[in-house]
Amino acid sequence: MEDQNHQIRARHNPATVTVYQAYAPHIGLPAARDGRFPSAWKRDRMTWIKPSFLWMMYRCGWGLKEGQETVLAVEITHEGFAWALRNACLSHYVRGLHPDQAAWKRQLHRSPTRVQWDPERDLQLRPLPYRSLQLGLAGEAARRYADEWTVSITDVTPLAREVHALVRAGDLDAAAARLPEERPYPAADDLLSHLRVPRPAHPAADGV
């Protein structure tokens, strides 16, 4: 049975998968203009990418948070996305997935990518009962992302503002119609098996 709680949902086509980020205008605007990240974008810092448009809206407050006023849609290659997943470690220790905390810490320190599964969001940015993937890229992964994987960068701040205005007006159907189409991403099991959080076993009933 498919694990719905650890399913990647994204906008994708045969060549690329789209992820979202938000930056201050001095980084976001040149990135969208030139189709690559400017020199002000630090390749030695961790950067988080998100396949979910609405989770990005939750994180950046519809592009209204300071330092996150420019929302970018970044198309990256499938090969790069797969590399990031294959070389990732969960950002937190999970009993039953990692042998022990020391083993998890060793894996985390040597992994250029880390993963969080955070609650997906609806149009009103309320948590949904399933998770959305967040990928943190550091070191080699951040450099590959900026210099090898990125195919195009688009400023989607106007779309964020349009959808937000429709939500504020209470027209959720129109807002939903403007959202990017995000479909289940065809990630092979070997890309996600080390990143799925095991579900807790059902506790035994009292008196059994």
Image: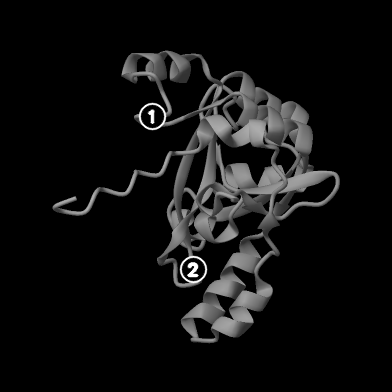
Residue 78 locus on image (x, y percent): 77, 38
39 lies above or below 128 = above
Residue 8, disc: none
Q: Is residue 63 left or right of residue 83?
A: left
Q: Nearer the viewer, mark 1 or mark 2?
A: 1
Residue 2 locus on image (x, y percent): 60, 50
Callout 1: helix, strand or loop? loop
Do we see residue 22 in this rendering?
no
Q: Is residue 136 left or right of residue 102?
A: right
Q: Amino acid at mark 1?
A: Gly
Q: Label 1, on which residue?
A: 96
Q: Residues within 10 Å of mark 1 (few under 14, many from 20)?
A: few
Q: Quadrant of residue 155?
A: bottom right
State the residue at coordinates (60%, 84%).
Answer: 173
Do we see residue 12 in this rendering?
yes
Q: Is residue 145 left or right of residue 47?
A: right
Q: Label 2, on which residue?
A: 122
The answer to whether the residue labelled 1 contacts the one labelled 2, judged by CB atoms less than 8 Å apart, is no
Callout 2: helix, strand or loop? loop
Residue 112 locus on image (x, y percent): 56, 21
116 lies above or below 183 = above
